[in-house]
Image: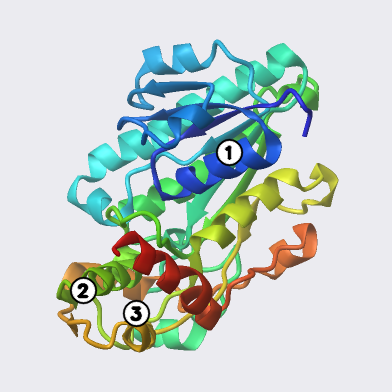
Amino acid sequence: MPKDETVLITGANGEIGHGLIEHLHTGRRARIIATDIQPLDSDLKPMCQTFLQGDITDPDLIGQLGQSPFTTIFHLASILSTKGERDPELAHHVNVDGTLHLLQLAAEQSRREGRPVRFIYPSSIAVYGLPDLETKARHGRVVREGEWCSPATMYGVNKLTCEHLGRYYALHYRSLEPATTRIDFRALRFPGLISALTVPTGGTSDYGPEMLHHAAQGKPYACFVRPDSQLPFMVMPDAIKALLLLEAAPRENLHQLVYNVTSYSPTAAEILQMILRSFPSAQLTFAPDERRQAIVDSWPADIDDSAARRDWLWKAEYDFRRSFEEYLTPSVHQRYA
């Protein structure tokens, strides 16, 4: 990336935004322009050249953001799966309309600057939709990017829609003009993410981090899925690593626009047992919620990230045991000490 890079981060106050801002500030000295609907945490403000608080669907905010030319856009802002099911119309408005506004902004800047703006989009395993547990057991162990893309949630529908919008703006928008005037869209599909530093905010895979944070605080917690529920997971440092590796990869090395990334795939019972090793008195139980359980059952037990490994040398650093022993448990101990 050029030395004079300027990076836009939307949803900057979320779980991923914290780690991304810290890395870009300390590791690359990039000029960071951040935006979020909530005030930016005080520890992040000195790391950002500009912070604009506002709604990503607001044309006035987009107009303000458009005054600075960006090298890269990390579009993190979204309404997550559980909240999206409570208000699907709002979820569509924020997740799809907000993304469309930013894609248009990136396309305009690419045309004006004569170089493609990199648009990094975190998608999700929510784009997958397996019809029942029998199918999940038979076919959902290792799912590739082009398989079972029939999402059962508005969040998943939104994410899949935005992947297609990104593909359109990268390959077909203003198709009669030079390719340098179109955006460089790159998306990765995250599994469930676990952070020790921020508290979960409405994702259906949040039962894992919620168990951990409640245990560390000595608070009882009833897990909203069955003990045998299984999903792929990843810790936040690997999520940041994946975004930055994908951003840095030479365009000619990328054979697709959307990539799976993952680390490990425990059951809810295995997560609980791992937490009890560090917090043996934790009051963790299971009380499945019918709707949220149905969503988890529709997502694959594991995903195939071989394309990312091949094209941009992706490899998670934290397996299940190391995630807890070296990152999660020490960090939450410190957080709640």
Residues at circles 2 and 1 in contact by the CB criterion of under 8 Å: no
Q: Which mark is residue 77?
A: none
Q: Which residue is mark 3?
A: 132
- Crowdedness of circle 2 by 10 Å Cα count: few (<14), some, many (20+)? many
Q: Amino acid at mark 2?
A: Phe
Q: Which residue is mark 2?
A: 224
- In this view, the residue in front, 122 or 290, is 122
The residue located at (25%, 38%) in the rendering is: 90
Disc 1 packing (10 Å; few <14; some 14–19; many ≥20): many
Which amino acid, mark 1?
A: Gly
Local SS, label 2: loop
Q: Label 3, label 1: how many angstroms apart (C-alpha)? A: 30 Å
Q: Residue at x 71, y 63 (%)?
A: 314
Residue type (three-letter) at the residue carrying disc 3? Asp
Q: Position of residue 112 (x, y in %)?
A: 70, 12
Question: Residue 308, relative to residue 225: is it above or below?
Answer: above
Residue at 68% x, 42% y: name it: 27
Q: Toward the viewer: 237 or 227?
A: 237
SS of the residue under disc 1? helix
Relative side of 16 to 314, left or right: left
Which mark identifies residue 166? 1
222 with respect to 265 (left or right): left
